[in-house]
Amino acid sequence: AMELWQVPVLFSRLPMFPFFDLAHYVASVMALKEQRGAVEVSVRSPIACWFSAMLYCFGGSVLSSLMLAEPPIAFLAKGTNILLASSVWYLVFYCPQDIFYRCFAFLPLRLLVAGMKEVTRTWKITAGVAHADSHFKDAWLVMVAVGWARGAGGGLISNFEQLVRGVWKPETNELLKMS
């Protein structure tokens, strides 16, 4: 019989790719599509829309890389993840009849995807703490900050993402109004 404290350990050992990563990308890109003006940007400037989607999907990696003085575009080296996230972006924004979006907007599927995304978030926080530990031994504050940035990066860099889309709302900054 498994004890309650062993459940997070069990989830942390599950392989993230492709199912949990896919759920993260679906939830992130759907959140982007639900932003005011995002659909218009997807028609007017697909490249800006794609870049915004990649910031939503990989914002934690970008932010934690900046915090650790590493190249913020290192996430682009993971070609399989970029291809998967780009495929999800294409399906969410350009699928005929909006079938892909409407399918995942169905509440039971949306809840499943959200739950899987939260499992991915715990894995990202753990990876961020371990990554910071490899650079700064015993600097617990740095580890917490990088773990936080890795787990909540998409929301933290949302102002930059809004600039990419041509809509900047500083009052929506995650640091000022945390969810």
Image (cartoon, helix red, strand yellow):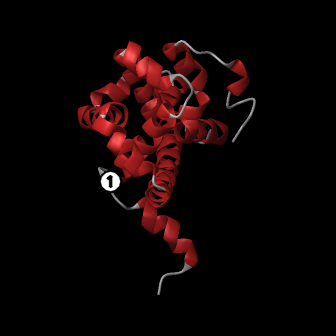
Residue 33 visible, this angle: yes
Is 90 on the left or on the right of 55, as rendered?
left
Total numbered circles:
1
Relative depth, front residue between 38 and 168: 38
Depicted 6 relative to depicted 92: above or below: below
Relative depth, front residue between 162 and 81: 162
Depicted 96 relative to depicted 43: above or below: below
| Quarter of the image where one finds residue 145 | top right
Q: Which residue is located at x 51 percent, y 53 percent? A: 118
Depicted 151 relative to depicted 158: above or below: below
Q: Is label 1 in a helix, a strand or a loop?
A: helix
Image quadrant containing the C terminus: top right
Residue 17 x, y percent position in the rendering: 30, 50
Residue 5 x, y percent position in the rendering: 57, 73
Is 170 on the left or on the right of 57, as rendered?
right
Q: Which residue is located at x 35 percent, y 47 percent? A: 22
Relative depth, front residue between 92 and 124: 92
Residue 60 x, y percent position in the rendering: 50, 34
How would you rate the neighbour count of disc 1 (Cα within 10 Å): few for under 14, some for 14-19, many for 20 or more?
Answer: some
Q: Which residue type does callout 1 highlight? A: Phe
Question: Farthest residue toward the front?
Answer: 97
Is 122 on the left or on the right of 42, as rendered?
right
Residue 71 visible, this angle: no
| Quarter of the image where one finds residue 84 | top left
Residue 3 x, y percent position in the rendering: 54, 80
Q: Which residue is mark 1?
A: 19
Q: Which residue is located at x 29 percent, y 36 percent? A: 95
